[in-house]
Amino acid sequence: MDDKNKYRLFLLFSLVFIFFLHAVATYFYLYWILWYLDDLLHFLGGVWLGLFASWLLFLSGKINIQTSNFFIIIIILGISALIGLLWEFSEFLLDKLLSIINIGRVHFFQPSIEDTMIDLFSDLLGGIVAAMFFLKNKRRYGQQP
């Protein structure tokens, strides 16, 4: 198995792991017990999104561009930030939906703006880690610096 196939397999298994961890944390109310778990999962999600973006854009062979490292970082961070922002919007809308159907004005998913900012920061931090990993291993995956 070559490196690109290992990369795809890693992406698949890590996505399953993140969703499993999220499902367990939601089912057992671990997000409310372990304050750092939300930040950890946002970080892992940012790493996953950054690695997926690098695979999608540079490793899949569908888009073959030689570009600067700075531009690669911007692309990977942009995708991590965009998906993280969409996730935060979905949590906001879910809170609004729950309040409309009379569950109350309890904010299950968006307790505060501080929580939202920490979540987005964790997504970006994960994206930075993924970008650094990709740049470090760019030659290994067939890209020349």
Image (cartoon, rainbow, N blue to C red):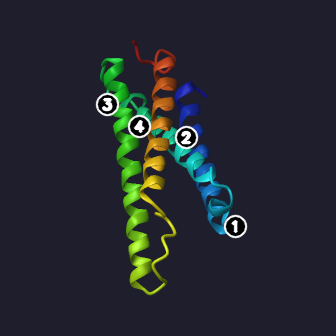
The residue at the point 45 percent across, 42 percent down is 121
Q: CA distance from mark 4 to mark 3?
A: 12 Å
Q: CA distance from mark 1 to mark 4?
A: 31 Å
Mark 2 or 3 closer to N-term? 2
Q: Is residue 116 above or below residue 76?
A: below
The image quadrant that residue 12 belongs to is top right
- Identified by mark 1, the residue type is Phe
Mark 1 or 3 closer to N-term? 1
- Identified by mark 2, the residue type is Leu
Q: Which residue is mark 4?
A: 53
Q: Which residue is mark 2?
A: 11
Please provide percent x and percent y for residue 30. Answer: 67, 61
Query: Residue 92 or 17: which is nearer the viewer?
Result: 92
The residue at the point 52 percent across, 69 percent down is 108
Q: CA distance from mark 2 to mark 4?
A: 11 Å
Q: Secondary structure at mark 3?
A: loop
Q: Which residue is mark 1?
A: 28
Q: Is residue 124 above or below residue 137?
A: below
Q: Is residue 99 above or below residue 28?
A: below
The image quadrant that residue 22 belongs to is bottom right
